[in-house]
Amino acid sequence: MQRTKPHRWTLIAICLLAATIVGLTLAPVSTVRADDDFKSLKKEYESAKSDESRTAMGRIIEKMGATNEKDAAKYLLGELADDQKQRKRGKAGLPGDVRDKIVAALAKFTDEESVGLIGEAALDLKSDKDPTLALDQFDFFKALATMKDVSAADETLREALADEKNPFIKCAALEAIRQAEASRFTKDVTAILLEDNKDWAQKWLIVPINTLACLEDIVDTGDKEQKIAVVEAVIAWEERKICLDERVRFFGSKMLNAITGEAADMASVYYWKWWVAQMKAVGAVDNSSKPEGKRSKTAAVPPVFDTAPVGKRFVFVIDTSDSMKMPLKITLEEIEKRKKSGPVTKGPKNSKDGEEDEKDPDADNPLRQLPWKEIDTKIALAREELSRAIRTFAGDRKFAIVTYSTEVNVITDGWIDATSGNCEKWADKAKELEPDAMTNIHGGLLRALKISDRGTDSDSPAVDPNTVLTGADTIVFLTDGWASWDDQSTTRVKDKRNNVDGSVGDGPFIYGENIWPDILRQNLFRKVIISTVGIGNHDKELLKNLAKKTGGT
């Protein structure tokens, strides 16, 4: 028998190796690569999360969204769920805008299975039984609302909008659509104003408030037919005369002003009928024949620290930390130079027809009434202005006062009816405030959101029916500095802002980047207006985000 020569074995081996390489080359590898990419990104993300590097976390999350891999979608959904669990326990959860990055990443998934996972995750949450789940629903809905031309995503959102019994799933969908500026849902959102549902109009006012807030941001102002349909829905709502709530009308008037440029109040039905007739007849408004329309503005609530409160329930949140003992370094003249703008729905100084707005009864700055020669410290200014405001506050409204230093106290022990006697009493008590200890900004704001007819505490102020139905309409928040303590702090540690040892608490809500996202999330559906007042060197980014994102000043 002839033996095979060694070079033949070498040739055979080379051929087999070549065939194997060709086979591997021709085999589909996209799934493997996507899976490998996700596994690698997951390790990177968890490392960045351990290091609390929100910038790196956000960058990796964006890459996960680009994989379009269902395991990546599952992982991101899990991160949102874990974050919400942390927040329910009073923890900080994901830092800064990382949660928003996850929602944006989920919106990039286009495969049917991943979109289905997100939709099922949203609708499977029973927020009618546990309203806290509406916060998770909002996240999933926002991802779906951000998607373009994905029918399964739109069907899920329309199912939520059409719910006739659960106000929380409805508000979750409305807020998601508003933030995504998804104008394709304008007709569906407008239809809510036409629903014959007394619960929305007389009890769950968060539904019309969120509907009107949503329309303000999604209506295409260049679409005449769309604007007419919205105004006609508002007319129908007003003609039913089943809701006279001031905050609903505030948000409605604000929306109408934004989409039409007209400054008439939502309740000026005759005016808006004329506007519709003009738009249908000639496509524009004839100013020469314009009827009287009640100018839209907030009720005559006395301004506080040069801000205009809205509604009937107000909380004053006052900084009484030790730094408030410091000398006041701002003058009345400097305060008056600041640009005056606020949560009002008046038109511009000169309206389109050349008429001037009605004179503002609060145009004369009430701060001039203060005894400025006696005001030499920050706390002195806070005491005098709070006292002045409360003394003039008598009327059909309620107020509460929250003070915060290291500890947070509702010194009124809940709502106080603004009778003349009560206003005099609490105006005097305001002058007794004394500064002490550290600065618990998060605790002060959170406690303000917890106040209701049932008391001053709530496990879930964002969705607790008591706080939703009888909580604050406006919060006026004053601080002179930067947060240094929170309700979870137990000891002092180094401040990462200045590397000073033992100067801040060890809790999760010390830095503005964690404080304002959590407060805004607590306020997601309630739409409480937060006006902020900063004295001296303070956390401007924190105050700006709180005011701008809630409609305050």
Image (cartoon, grey):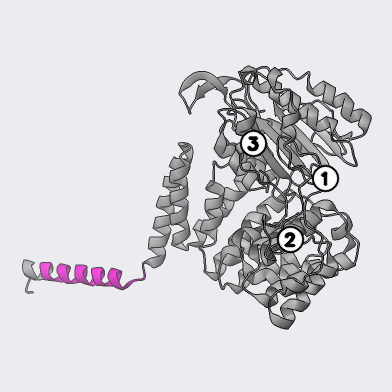
- Residue nearer the viewer, 259 or 449: 259
Closer mark to the observer between disc 2 and disc 3: 3
The mark that comes first in sequence, 2 or 1, is 2
**Alpha carbon distance from label 3 to label 1:** 21 Å
Q: Which residue is mark 2?
A: 263
Q: Is residue 135 left or right of residue 419?
A: left
Looking at the rendered structure, the secondary structure element under dot 1 is loop
Taking the image as shown, residue 404 lies to the left or right of residue 195, namely left
Q: Secondary structure at mark 3?
A: helix
Is 78 above or below relative to 124?
Answer: above
- Mark 1 = which residue? 300
Disc number for residue 336: 3
- Say what amino acid the circle numbered 2 marks: Ala
Say if mark 2 contacts mark 3, CB within 8 Å: no
Q: Is disc 2 placed on a helix, strand or loop?
A: loop
Asked if residue 28 is among those painted magenta in the image, a careful observer would answer yes
Q: Residue at x 68, y 51 (%)?
A: 135
The residue type indicated by label 3 comes to Glu
Of the pair 125 and 244, the residue shown nearer to us: 244
The span picked out in magenta is: 10-29
Tell which of 339 and 133 is nearer to you: 339
Looking at the image, which residue is at 17% across and 72% down? Answer: 15
Indicate the position of residue 519 as horizontal and vertical percent values.
66, 41
Residue 40: percent from the left, percent from the top?
Answer: 40, 51
